[in-house]
Image (spheres, coloured by chain):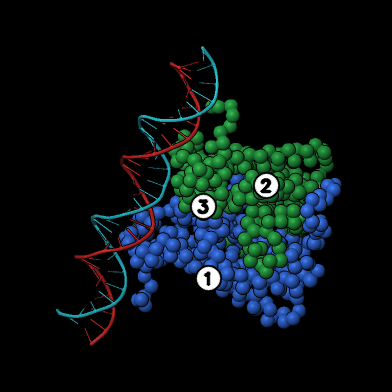
Chain colours: A blue, B green, C cyan, D red
Amino acid sequence: MSSTHSSTKERILSAAERLFAEAGIGNTSLRLITTRARVNLAAVNYHFGSKDGLVEAVYERRLGPVTREWLANIENLEHEYGDRPIPVERIVESFVRPVARLASDENRGGRIFTRLLAQGYTEARQYFDKLFSSQYQHVLDRYRQSLRTALPHLPPGTLCWRLQFLLGALTQGLCGGELLRLMEGQADPNDTERAVDELIPFLVAGLRAEAPRLRESGPSTQGALA
Amino acid sequence: MSSTHSSTKERILSAAERLFAEAGIGNTSLRLITTRARVNLAAVNYHFGSKDGLVEAVYERRLGPVTREWLANIENLEHEYGDRPIPVERIVESFVRPVARLASDENRGGRIFTRLLAQGYTEARQYFDKLFSSQYQHVLDRYRQSLRTALPHLPPGTLCWRLQFLLGALTQGLCGGELLRLMEGQADPNDTERAVDELIPFLVAGLRAEAPRLRESGPSTQGALA
DNA sequence: GATCATTTCAAACGGGCGTTTCAATCATAC
DNA sequence: GTATGATTGAAACGCCCGTTTGAAATGATC
């Protein structure tokens, strides 16, 4: 391993990231990637072993820093508040910020990468699951723990669902942006700061909402519809 | 065209839907699809023209009924309330229900299809954009209009953002479900009814939240924060 | 400046891809 | 039953895929 980082590796990663996000991983060939990166075809197998290795590297390059920032944020909050509940706003903001930083990292292509996250659940599930269980899950548990303390009235199951909704809204708000472009141009999907400003009150209100009265869970219990 | 629908077409659609959702469109070959469907390889090109045509057909089969149900729901509400604002809960529920119906349509594979929606933005963007601009967008505008009346205090831009968040939470809640599986098993991602019960108060509270105080949008104009 | 490991390069490999072909089969109407 | 059109079938087409190879170029070490 050379001490100076290879520009070839980075060029491949950036080209692959962009093309994966645009057309999907399965539809993007190594030949196209290496052509865009102005690099020899064999360089992918030399530096990353295989296409699978490249996919894994593309994800890890972006997800690592975000996870580390999440962890630092929640630990700072826990230290600042000790045993007292952390305000929901601060928990939410400390979770949203790292993703926003990634999404607004234009020059390094972060905005492009975020589109890949949606694909993580299907095309790249094998790598995604590995990454998730190794670091992502741990961070998510920390945030869930803090939210349980901040929202003690919420049933744990309800909190889990709301975390899921939160992640969906976050992904759509900071990584999707396609819908807004089609809605009369009344909102700019690339305005990351605006997205954060809009996301936080939406999410905080959703998390703070009263828990639903649940129906019976037995079979054939059709509650009377209003 | 024969009057009796071909069972071959349906078998191909179902097999393709499942395999696309599992591994991505680009990673699924026609040979695998036709083997699973116990159908001749050439049947795909005969019935759908090409692989692209098959992808389009897979999306259209599921999305058409949902869009029609959305339209009927919002029109019923508009008729019921006339010029008076429709309660946010009813708007949200009438939007969530059709997706939930699709997600819970186990025996016909609806649950599987929903995973494909996330891919729509990347792998199948060309078909998705076509479908979106032809019908989806119209329906979404109707819902947005009803929400504007129901939430007159919200700036239009904020409402657009919140609709985007709503769609993200909805997708993640009813179509994703992977995260919940990994969260200590405190929630069942296949419990569609529970998902709806949890989604509605979350979304209604988020929509009803106070609009954020926005920062100045000019360069380097950091307004005094309260 | 010879040695050695690292990196780049052009070319080729076998294999799987989407698609086409054309004959065989089926259903239906005469 | 035979003609007709719609469907299915087995085989092949050319193409592009991910990967491998072995030699050339590069850069550091002594």
| SS at badge 1 | helix
Q: Residue at x 47, y 65 (%)?
A: A56
D16 displayed left or right of A202:
left
Between A197 and D10, the one lying in front of the other is: D10
Alpha carbon of mark 3 to alpha carbon of mark 1: how far? Answer: 25 Å
Between tags 3 and 2, which lies in front? 2
Kind of residue sitting beneath label 3: Gly
Dot 3 or dot 2, earlier in sequence: 3
Determine which residue is flagged by label 1. Answer: A64
| SS at badge 2 | loop
Q: Residue at x 72, y 82 (%)?
A: A82
Neighbours of disc 1 within 10 Å: few (<14), some (14-19), many (20+): few
Determine which residue is flagged by label 3. Answer: B24
Assign the N terminus of chain B to one quadrant of the image: top right
Alpha carbon of mark 3 to alpha carbon of mark 2: how far? Answer: 21 Å
Determine which residue is flagged by label 2. Answer: B105
Q: Residue at x 55, y 41 (%)?
A: B11
Q: Position of residue B37 (x, y in %)?
A: 52, 44
Neighbours of disc 2 within 10 Å: few (<14), some (14-19), many (20+): some
Q: Are marks 3 and 1 on the same chain?
A: no
